[in-house]
Amino acid sequence: MTTTTEQLEQVARLAAEAAPVWRTSSAGERAGWLRAIADALDANATELVEIADRETRLGSARLTGEVARTTGQLRSFASVVEEGSFREIVVDDADAGATPPRPELRRWLVGLGPVAVFSASNFPFAFSVAGGDTASALAAGNPVIVKAHSGHPELSRRTAEIVAEALRAAGAPEGSFALVEGREAGNALVRHPVVQAAGFTGSVSGGRALFDLATGRPDPIPFYGELGSINPVVLTPAAVTARGRDLAAGLVGSFTLGAGQFCTKPGVVFIPSDAGFEDAVATAVGSVAGGPLLTDRITAAFPDGIRTLLDDASTSIIAHGAETPDGARPVVVTTDAAAVAARPETLLEEVFGPLTLLVRYRDEADLHAALHVVPGSLTATLHAEDGDDVSETLELLQLRAGRVLFAGWPTGVAVTWSQHHGGPWPATTSLHTSVGATAIRRFLRPVVFQDAPERLLPPELRDAALASVPHRRNGVLVIPA
Amino acid sequence: MTTTTEQLEQVARLAAEAAPVWRTSSAGERAGWLRAIADALDANATELVEIADRETRLGSARLTGEVARTTGQLRSFASVVEEGSFREIVVDDADAGATPPRPELRRWLVGLGPVAVFSASNFPFAFSVAGGDTASALAAGNPVIVKAHSGHPELSRRTAEIVAEALRAAGAPEGSFALVEGREAGNALVRHPVVQAAGFTGSVSGGRALFDLATGRPDPIPFYGELGSINPVVLTPAAVTARGRDLAAGLVGSFTLGAGQFCTKPGVVFIPSDAGFEDAVATAVGSVAGGPLLTDRITAAFPDGIRTLLDDASTSIIAHGAETPDGARPVVVTTDAAAVAARPETLLEEVFGPLTLLVRYRDEADLHAALHVVPGSLTATLHAEDGDDVSETLELLQLRAGRVLFAGWPTGVAVTWSQHHGGPWPATTSLHTSVGATAIRRFLRPVVFQDAPERLLPPELRDAALASVPHRRNGVLVIPA
């Protein structure tokens, strides 16, 4: 069901027509549209989970939870829209006495126009057709055109039908939402003059290719890609001594979750070289099964990734999980910090699937030399005890990741006002998050009105409306009572 | 005085070493450093203006005002840093009862690392060595490396000396600020692994080349370019009838200001075809002199730009300003909306210098067809009367520009909390402003701490510090008393 050039043109034309309606929609209208999508997905959850399980084999428990996460996310963005801070309204009154005299300025953020969203394979709901990029782009006031992931085509089509129908029934304009399929259609989408921004979750190679298309346009557009992440974890000797067995169990649970197919999987773990932590991990992983991988491509790539690691003389497999007839077997590989510092491009390449690399370090200098070469990541985790001096380690981790954790494990990304899901290249391509309330900022642009007669201002920028929305006036923040 | 490869490496190494000091500097320290620069520039204003006038011939009155604008801008960013909202601090407390249980998250924005700034020729202070990009990058907590504009090399060096010395005397680390010279050094700078973002003000061709280098890096970095802008103006028939002579005088004042070398110069003016406005402009411009242009390249390009316009059969010159021995003579060219709609790439190319293009429109349909093809601009201006129905015109102008004016003229950009100086390509390369308080956002990245022990949190994110800074906690905005 590859989308043809003619079909794409039709989709783009309708999205362009819908754009001004979305941009000028009220907070109430837009929140209603987002909630209508959430309600429709919830109402069809059983059918959707069944299709998703058939196509992804992620299991109905996980998938049912993911539907709830996805609809919760849509409703969360509805609340963000209603709260109104996302507009970043700033008013400076005229000042005839200033040198030079200052005009009245009223600034806000408005929707950019049609947004292209490229779905991921590993979250067929939360990072797919009606996932976070779609929710935040709609919340910002933009029509969305989704490029379906080939890993779950039927689910993509059915989800898109439900979204489009919910929007239609709720009174949103034709052209608010569409799905396209096929690699060529995706490439054409990101280059289409109507499209004003793109969101992407996927591989470094796929993301880079689309990023290059987006930035190479005659009129470059922002490309918000979440690409690859190794998610370093550091265990101090004191932490391993105090709670090595718990840490081993926690690590195994995290790197095998979803068969190791999370963008926040702890892919590299720095461990003290003489603490016996490897044994604890080997014990913990022994009975843990992997699971089927998402696609044939991922299934084929997993053993390739292991082989590439093992080609390095410093590495060896120290433990396997349980063997199952249908699924990738968890695997734990070790190396040392000196090897990582010397050959990061080989040893710190992300391997999608249930694999983690334990890196033995002798001392802080050894550890820090290796941390210096860890690629940009979504997360970095530090397990330390109260007495540890971790200031330099923490400084290095903050430079390499957007989320720094001190307890628990990086898998699991809360959808909140405060969340940041992003990091230095190749974790993401931009200084913005793809999860949480502030993800909406990616699809907005500022516009300021200078000395506008009140009748020509957007209703939201008139004095009467300011009373009910957080804003800044003459430099001072104002929160509605 | 071209910067050598070895010199650039030295500058980059020192900036990398200074970066953590800037990133972790307190608001008070950073504000002090910004004010120290401002004070030092003010103290040396007479000398700086003299050098600037010799190199740019912009005149001492204009240049003295520009120094004040520049130092005011530095002090304004000091206040922005002290106010603290720019950190966008968001805290969500842990919620063990949520499904799944939610960790504590504390998010803020921190400096990216060393920033490259490419100076403009037309504002030798406000958009040059110590201009807006430098001020906002330092305010965000980053060392800055400026690529000097070849149009005012001596001024660039002297300004850089004063800035570096002021920072040193105020206790900022070595490597906080540096200047490089030469095109090759600029290209190397934007590709240097140490550099984490770039700001640029200049031509579309120069900006595009650097944008391509920045986005083409193995690790792409954000490139904030302000490139080119035609700044459309629309006059309704009623406005011309009511105050045609004032509008003509205002337009002439604006397009000849600074010899037409402002990025906000009104370059294309849509006028009703039968209102006699051309005569009013011809009268107003007759006695107005231009002035010397900034560089030999700009001086040579101005007549080329006029010739290109006149090659189009639809155009003619309807008026000239006063002839002066040393300077570009103001010129007013006319065409019609149908020609603009048919050949925007010829007729709507920005011409740097004292030229404006009057475009006659017969009716709204004629006007709107032409507005559809106006390139993205920094500003759009509408002069209308109370009885005019301008909704569709206004809709089109908002799509094409970041600042929409309803009175006055686009030259003159107030440095305020609310300002937005940006717009669709080619006005700027991003969804951010290069003037005003929110320009700081370009040089910050989010970091979130999950379940961090208080002692390991940055001081600004601890509960005690939150009492004195605007932030959001559990979804609710909090303003310090």
Image (cartoon, coloured by chain):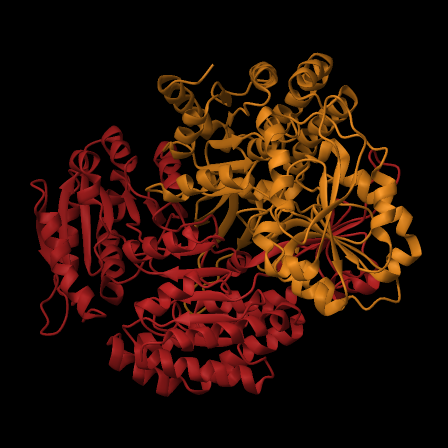
Chain colours: A orange, B red
Camera-nearest residue between B90 and B330: B90
Left/right of residue B391 with respect to residue B103 in the rendered view: left
At x 53% / y 42%, what residue is drawn? A204
Residue B168 image offset from top left, x and y in percent: 55, 85
Does residue B156 show up?
yes
Q: Quadrant of residue A256?
A: top right
At x 76% / y 66%, what residue is drawn? B459
Query: Would you place residue B389 above or below residue A220 in this image?
Result: above
At x 80% / y 44%, what residue is drawn? A251
Residue lying at the far front in this picture: please name it. Answer: A313
Residue lying at the far top in this picture: please name it. Answer: A47
Quadrant showing the N terminus of chain B: bottom left
At x 57% / y 64%, what residue is drawn? B140
Q: Quadrant of residue A409?
A: top right
Q: Quadrant of residue B30?
A: bottom right
Does residue A464 show up?
no
Query: Would you place residue B176 above or below residue A339 in this image?
Result: below
The number of numbered discs placed on residues in the rendered structure image is 0
Left/right of residue B33 with respect to residue A215 in the rendered view: right
Residue A376 image offset from top left, x and y in percent: 60, 53
Query: Would you place residue B254 above or below residue A176 in this image?
Result: below
Left/right of residue B408 with respect to residue B81 in the rendered view: left
Residue lying at the far right in this picture: please name it. Answer: A242
Residue B161 image offset from top left, x and y in percent: 43, 84
Quadrant showing the C terminus of chain B: bottom right
Camera-nearest residue between A287 and A227: A287
Residue B4 image offset from top left, x and y in percent: 36, 76
